[in-house]
Amino acid sequence: MTRPSDEQLHERWRDQPAPLLPLLHELHERDGYLSEEALRGVAKALRIPIAELFGTVTFYHHFAREPGGLEAPRVCTGPVCRLRGAGDLLDSLDGAVSMPCSGRCDEPVPVLRGSSTLVGLAADALESRPSPLPPAAPAGIEECIFAEMRTEGRAGLEGYRSSGGYDALKTAVLESTGPEVIRTITDSGLAGRGGAGFPTGRKWSAVADAAGDPKTIVCNADEGEPGCFKDRVIMDYDPHAVIEGMALAAFATGATRGFIYLRYEYPETEGILEAAIAEAEAAGLLGDGILGSDVDFKLYVRRGAGAYICGEETSLLNSLEGKHPFPRNRPPYPVTHGFEGLPTVVNNVETLAACAPILRNGPDWYRGLGRGDNAGTKIISLSGDVVRPGNYEIPLGLPLRELIDDWAGGAYEGRNVQAVTMAGISGGFLAGEDLDVDLDEASVRERGSMLGAGGIMVFDDSRDMIDVAHSAMEFFAHESCGKCFPCRIGTQRLTERLAGKAGPKELSDWLDEVRDLGETMKETSACGLGMAAPLISESLVKYFPERVAQHVTSVR
Amino acid sequence: MSDNIDGGGNGALSTMTLDGEDVGFTPGETVYEVSERYRREIPTLCYDERLEPFGGCRLCIVEVEGSHNPVASCTTKAAPGMKVTTKSGRLDMHRRVLLELVASENRDLDVDPMSGYASGEMATLLDRYDARTGRFLGMQSGTSHPDDPNPFILRDYENCISCFRCVRVCAEQEGDYAISVMNRGFGTQITTEFDGILKDSACTFCGQCIQTCPTGALADLKALASKDVPGETKLTRTICPYCGVGCSVDLMTRGDQVVGVLPAMDGPANHGALCVKGQFAFDFIGHKDRLDTPLVRGDDGQLHPATWDDALDKAAAGLLAAVDNHGRHSLYVVASGRAPTEAAYMMQKFVRAGLGTSYIDNCSRA
Amino acid sequence: MSNPLADMDKPDVIFCIGTNMTECHPVAATGIKRALANGAKLIVADPRHIVLADLADVYLPLRVGTDSALLLGMAHVIAREGLVDQAFMDARTTEGMAFLEHVERFPPEWAEEITGVPAADIEQAALWYGRAERGAIYYTLGVTEHICGVENVQGLCNLVLMTGNIGREGTGINPMRGQNNIQGAGDAGALPNNYPGFQPVTDPENQEKFEKLYGKKVDLENGITKVTALEMCGDQIRAMFIDGENTLVSDPDRAHCEKALRSLDFLVVADLFLTETAELADVVFPVAAWGEVDGTQTNTERRIQRLRAAVPSPGVARPDWWVISALAKRMGFQGFEYEGAEQVFNELCEVSPIYHGVDWDKVEEGAYQWPVPFDGHPGTPMLHSDEFVNGRGIFNLVEQRDPAETVDDDYPVWLTTGRRLASYHTRTQTGRSAGIDYLLSEESLEIHPDDVDEWGLADRSWAIMSSRRGSVRVRVKATKRSPRGTVFTTFSFADVPVNALTGGGYDPITQTAELKVCPVSVVPE
């Protein structure tokens, strides 16, 4: 293939929706970095002020600004990988740089090289492998999303259709109405599985009722939370489930365009999604006049470039629009003022993947999958010091102990679970008696934490919790967007204190500072990142006061 | 995501409660604007009334009944029936912590007031909230740009608190988009395209960034050059002497010296905007080339200093000689488009009342 | 301006022609940039690819001196596409039918031939302006400094009248005045044809009125313009009194100008500095500068604002009004006893119908835009909202006319002149302000890079530029802001006296010099 010129690339993307990121990626991959000349061309072609474009490019972790930057191996140094030899790997790979958790905690340590993900524990053992499949569910557990996923060929259209795939869309488009679809989703109790837990039916209904066209469905596949890797497995093995979910959302709300905003660190997934979209388009399941109806829905994949905050829906929308990815002030919310200021549904991958099964099997079926009053299932990405890490689709309300010990084989021989993180790291730690908790949002929140996107990392009694907390806080500091004061400065100050690099030497002063900081961050931050970060320091002090005291008073 | 998906009610009532007092508001007004109108002292650092609310500093938080966390009043629209508290122990605690935090990231807390219009904002708030405690110490943020050789704008980012008023004023008020935000989190840095010097960017040196900076990180180098001139700084409102837009400015003087220009935020033609000429090209009036005495051409053919009396006599005689010898239509006068209107009026009266002619023009034709 | 500056972020279609607003009126341009951010469409017509052209939705790079052709082409499209506001034309204009017939002759293809602008772009511009809900026109000297300056303005008026884009918020026809108080100077009657407040000299009622006021009967005929006066120097004109103008450097045809001033029996100049013009004077008066005087000035939107003294003047320099009145008294003229600027301004308000409703105290806050015909009147931010000053708006059947001089084998290049952001006029002020040199330290001639190559020049090399009247030596700057075959420079630097070249012709009505067009040759030094 000949090397495309800047002009050809500008021409290719200029009139496409959300053109900035794909255009930058093409140039990045063509040249191995983003040169000044290339950026000046983009600024002109897309009429973005050059200073703004330059600033925006520097926001993303993975855009290289020096020649050869793209080829440098990037080694995951997330909370689990750093306990699995990421440091050694980083040292032994030529020119390697570190990257935050890249969503392969069930198979450490992932290394990104160019556009492929390699895994292995040593420099000479790196190889490309498909994402690990979810371990089998225990007997008697009925799954929703994972039910058919382990079937060979599921990622292809034929495989997907063999067990009822696209039946829900067909029924909806040809026999049902938008309001009926929304009612079913509402009745099922499905709520946002990315962590916010907003009722999906209400969100769709708000977009259906909102004025303004065209409307947009955005699939939030920017799975950046450390310890979360569920969306990856869904998209890799069941891309049509996500597509069908989006098409259903589009039908229900009247949206005519959709984007899957995929995190940068899943390069193989992009190909899988693109292939699935092409298949669906060819089969008349996407595009103009879906299944011969008058429903139009055009779907695009847009790849992020390494920024945790882009998982926050308004940052994501700014990123899609080619703007600096700061979170927006709300209200107005995306349901009325989303992509390009128009009504927009932003749903998580898992939420969308649940929609078709719910419409096929009915709302009561889905509700019944949960335990007690909890409706439905939740995928938990379980990793760390546990025998069988992986993605587990649990009935909401399953006790945490049951998941760790019975489903995942418990801690390693001779070790005990010291603590787990919740919601990736956004829920802070649970430890001690609080490990006896049922996995549903209400129960977890009672203990001062949250279930969130469902990442749980296990740390056994061999681990230094100060070190774990420091690494988590360092992540937040690294990913803080810099827009609001409490988060920008607060995450930095907490990191310094957990590293022992700054802060009072008197324990009571140290605790006062950390507490005051935490209170102010939780109550005044502009988005969830700054609100969640202090849960790490707060729960550390709560569960491990002696270790904290020792840390503060030890000689620095 | 909050349950409050539409951001409040839409009733026809336009009253809300502010610290227990019923107050009216115009739909579309923010809680901050309403509070300002009712003279509540709500602190801000990222707010500039000419710009879109940003919601970065979080100092303007208020409590709203029914909302778990305090909300930023600058980005929250007033809604009918809303119950707002602008002052409480909890809010004061948060505001103080936030101020201690920004104080902890800067090299200097106090800068010379000549730095710029808003340069004392942070220091004032630190005092008001008793926030000079030295808590939360750690790394300082921002890398200064001492290598930028421009003679107008100091770029001392070690005193930057990342409120982005400069970036926003450059984009929203000036439309130049010369500066932007680089990196993220604590590494956030105000930058130009490719982090160069201002002259190599789209910067037009209008100085708006200086005047909105609340810490003096961006500062007026020309004014600062006069910071040691003795005397108190006095402000005099006048109009810019350059193009026809008529921007209002406040001349900064110390003693008999003009030391700088501040844009007038309430100027009817400019609302605080200026350009490089209005902001920085003021010191010609004190230039050594200024004429300070009348000059009369002597017998040697050279111009020599003279008294007013002599000069007026000589001029009157010269002009009258022409009129006497060649008639009143032999004298022509040119009025200035640069001088005050009174000068032009006087000039036309000079020919009309003095000679009965209209032998006058101004410089509008060239 | 027909509309206030505050309107500039309100149009949905903006047509900027012959205005380098981001450099010459930067603060006004911020309004346009805000309108663009709100989604307005911008049409820019200018021979040079100025910064505004970068922001434009359609850019019309017309050849210098072809404005009328462009405007006729646009009017043709508006008429042909039925975008005429018939109700407005019926109610408020005359000669409309004749005009619509007239423009049938000028399709955009015809305009393309003359202007060099693709017909499709002329169509697009016309369609946008014609369909605009709020279409606003902004122009500056790029339109007026031609021998056909009046016709160019009439061409713009025609577009306004046929579309009804006037008298409403965000519309209008808006010339941007170039000097801080050029509006005030005209308002005050410093014109050969008008008393203060634009009261015609030729009206016997006015003659009578001012005879009463001034105690002197003033000629019923118009005076002469400065251009004519300079022509007559040494002949009829024997003495001049010039206040605050560096005529020698700012007026066209420097050689002619210098000869004229030198031929006078007597020259008096009042200024801040010993300018090139002052150096020729017999008597020079030192005047107080901005920042040293109280007074008023009136901006481009007719807003009357107060100037205030902040510091004393150097030495014995005095305010202009004091100098002029002192000289008048010395010459035995009656009625020049004044105590201050306040008294002068209040007298102007009394004699001028457009200032009649204000006085020194009332203009304190700058709240009034004239006309303010009587006390209690709120001022007039927008003109022409109900009717035009002379009743109905009159269409003019303008035609395209060539510039006074056109390019030929000897002078094959078009020179056009203007200003740059960081310098003002002849730099008597900006050149004496610290730091400005950092942005702009010397004159340059902006030439398209391909022309630079073709003419045997190099970027930053020296060139000799000559016209039929003179030559200058100037440094070359290669830039795509200049189109092929057209070069640009300013009259800011005394060492590159560009007015030695210009001055080929004048508008016959206003006697404005054709500073925007001058055929030159450009050769390596």
Image (tube, rainbow, N blue to C red):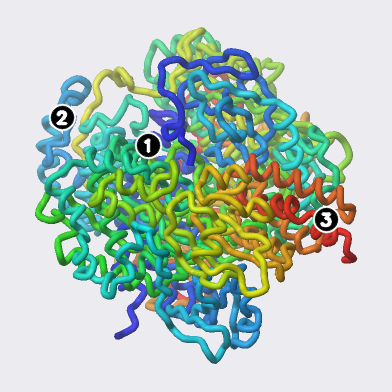
Q: Which residue is mark 2?
A: C96
Q: Residue at x 53, y 10 (%)?
A: C213
Residue A221 figure quarter: bottom left
Residue C132 figure quarter: top left
Do the residues bearing badges 2 and 1 touch, measured as CB atoms within 8 Å?
A: no
Mark carried by residue C510: 1
Badge 3 and badge 1 in a common chain: no
Q: Position of residue C124 (x, y in %)?
A: 22, 49
* Residue C395 falls left or right of residue C461: left
- Using the image, determine if residue B185 lies above or below residue C285: below
Q: Position of residue B308 (x, y in %)?
A: 77, 31
For this rendering, which residue is in front, B204 or A296?
Answer: A296
Circle 2 or circle 1, nearest the eye: 2
Residue extending furthest toward the bottom: A124
Query: Looking at the figure, which quarter contains the N terminus of chain C?
Result: top left
**Cα distance between the residues tagged 2 and 1:** 25 Å
Question: What secondary structure is marked by label 1?
Answer: loop
Mark carried by residue A503: 3
**Cα distance between the residues tagged 3 and 2:** 81 Å
Q: Is residue A345 visible?
A: yes
Circle 3 or circle 1, nearest the eye: 3
**Mark 1 crowdedness (10 Å alpha carbons): few <14, some 14-19, many ≥20:** some
* Residue A447 falls left or right of residue A254: right
